[in-house]
Amino acid sequence: MSRFPETPFDDAGKYVAAYGEEIAKAFATLDQAAFRKAAAALQDAVSRNATIFTCGNGGSAAIANHMVCDHTKGTRADTDILPRVHSLVANIEINTAIANDLAYDQVFSYQLQSYASKGDVLVAISSSGNSPNILNAIKWAKDHGVTTIAMTGFAGGKAKEMADIPLYVAANNYGVVEDVHQSLMHALAQFMRQRHMHDPALIAARSF
């Protein structure tokens, strides 16, 4: 797995074309069996009215928050499902309180202690797979019967090994990894939605 870019580019057009190729190569490394398991875990959670939690740092935090939008409002368009999706990064007050009074590596696990129940699902997003707060969240979840899905990149890190379902993409560029993770988040939401649409013919006409 080579690093991107290995050498500077003088032409922006060539750079964006090469960047797109890197995304395609990263996508090709995804284990489709793992994606099927992730989709099934989310589907099962929705069918049982369980809660799906998301978390991440930096760009991964943005993906976690975006997941709430697409897996709540997006999946409900032309369906009868009512997903319960909660982002552990969305409330700046509780995150800064935990980080300031306890430790930043506890910001997600501490919230799970209050919110999560056995049978829920945690989607933890970390490009490196080694963020301490992500690893603590996965550990707490696994210890308490919460199914864990980890989106990772680079070498996968500890999160890849710890999670019940690793969604790993082999890429060494943060932007590429985050772009693929964002796409996986969208794909999971849209797959769920099209499975529950009243009229499958509306899929192309009413995509989101």
Image: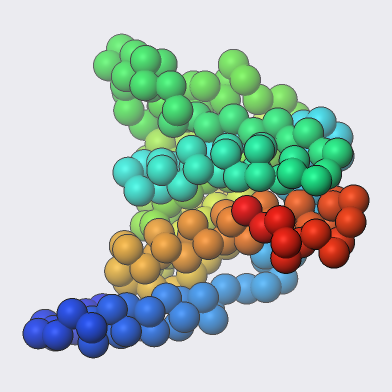
Classify residue 201 as left or right of residue 103. right
**Location of residue 150 with respect to 27 vertically, above or below:** above
Residue 167, visible in the rendered structure:
yes
Q: Indicate the colouring scheme.
A: rainbow
Q: Position of residue 46 (x, y in %)?
A: 79, 39
Q: Which image quadrant: the N terminus?
A: bottom left
Residue 11 drawn at (x, y percent): 14, 85
Q: Observer-nearest residue: 162 or 12? A: 12
For residue 105, side relative to residue 121 (left or right): left
Is residue 51 visible from the viewing direction of this image? no
**Seen from this angle, which residue lies furthest right?**
198
Figure disc tally: 0
Q: Residue at x 40, y 36 (%)?
A: 133
The picture places residue 47, in percent across and down from the top left corner, at 86, 39
Residue at position x 66%, y 37% in the image: 72
> Residue 47, relative to residue 175: is it above or below?
above
Q: Is residue 164 left or right of residue 111?
A: right
Name the residue located 90 percent from the left edge and 51 percent from the top edge.
198
Which of the 4 image quadrants contains residue 68? top right
Q: Quadrant of residue 194?
A: bottom right
Name the spot of residue 5 as percent of width and height, x first. Answer: 21, 80
Q: Quadrant of residue 75?
A: top right
In the rendered image, the vertical position of residue 86 relative to residue 23, given as above or below: above
Determine the residue positioned at 67% across, 64% down: 35
